[in-house]
Amino acid sequence: MMRRILPATALVLALGTVHAAPAGAGAPRPFSAHYLAQWKDISVGVSDLVLVRGTDPGRYVYTWRISARGIFRLFYRHDVVQKSWLRVEGAAVRPEIYEAEDGSSRIHMDFDWARRSVRGTLSGKPLDLALKAGTQDLMSIQIQVMQDLRQGRLPAKFWIIDKDQIKDFDYHRAGEARIQTELGDLDTIVVTSRRPGGNRVLTMWFAPSLGFVPVQATRTRGGKLEFAMRIEKLSH
């Protein structure tokens, strides 16, 4: 999680197709969640996810901050911060601006949906990509998945901008599980994500009773645990 490549820190790995919103689709509920982070069973830091409403109806700002702790602070002095300005219309999520910062590394993206393009800068170099329908950024995808789960569905394929490429990811609703957390025992929906044919798997646990907020996530490679994030506090 504390690697110096920004997209590799994204537990919200995968992308979403914008869907026609069914009648009665619920809006995301703003929240602030605090997590403990582990790397290969070693406590390495903390993580915070915050969703707030924007100034206009249907617009939100979603922020993820990762902070190293203890001895790891010697190697990772700067917090990793990712932020997405997005719009939600029913079950459909559309990113408008994405920014990320990791020490001296910076990413900025402006989404132009009228022209189906995204422009910005990646580590000081120009970025210009043609957008696929429903492309998500590393943050907005998580809100898209939450909206899809709220509607009782989950597409099998998602798209995301990773650095200067648009990549596809396979998603799978792996079932339901009741897990123990610092917030008590929770019923959750388990979702997995991976690149087609890849051996790195992201597994996420979403709690319907908490507005589908993710309460746990793990990443494995070849069946071995690389990273885990477990919720400690939540406020709405």
Image: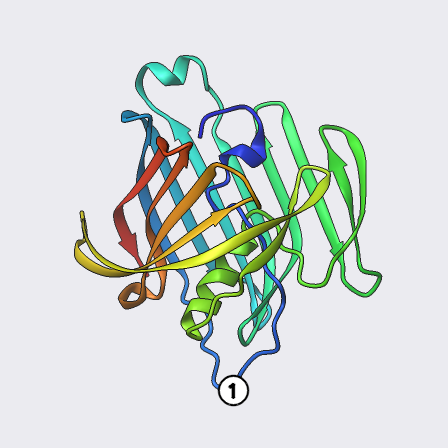
- At a point 34% along the width and 50% down the height, the residue shown is 33
Residue 89 appears at what percent x and percent y?
58, 74
- Whether residue 186 sits left or right of residue 204 in the image: it is left
**Rendered-image quadrant of the N terminus:** top left
Q: Quadrant of the C terminus?
A: bottom left
Asked if residue 226 lies left or right of residue 90, the reply is: left
Residue sitting at 37 percent across and 17 percent down?
A: 72
Residue at horizontal 65 percent and vertical 32 percent from the top: 106
On screen, residue 177 above or below 33: below
Question: What is the x, y in percent for residue 225?
Answer: 34, 32
Q: Is residue 215 above or below residue 27?
A: above
Q: Quadrant of residue 46?
A: top left
Residue assigned mark 1: 23
Residue found at the far front of this picture: 197
| Residue 87 versus residue 223 in the image, above or below | below
Question: What percent of the width, then of the height, locates residue 146?
Answer: 44, 63
Please tell me whether residue 22 is drawn above or below residue 42 in the rendered image.
below
Which residue of the protein is positioned furthest toward the bottom in this rendering? 23
Q: Amino acid at mark 1?
A: Ala
Percent x, y for residue 95?
64, 58
Left or right, 138 with reference to 41: right
Q: How many circles with numbers are drawn on the protein?
A: 1
Colour mode of the rendering: rainbow
> Dot 1, how many residues are within 10 Å of its Cα: few (below 14), some (14-19), or many (20+)?
few
Residue at 48% x, 66% y is 154
Front-most of residues 225 and 207? 225
Tag 1 secondary structure: loop
Furthest residue to the right? Answer: 115
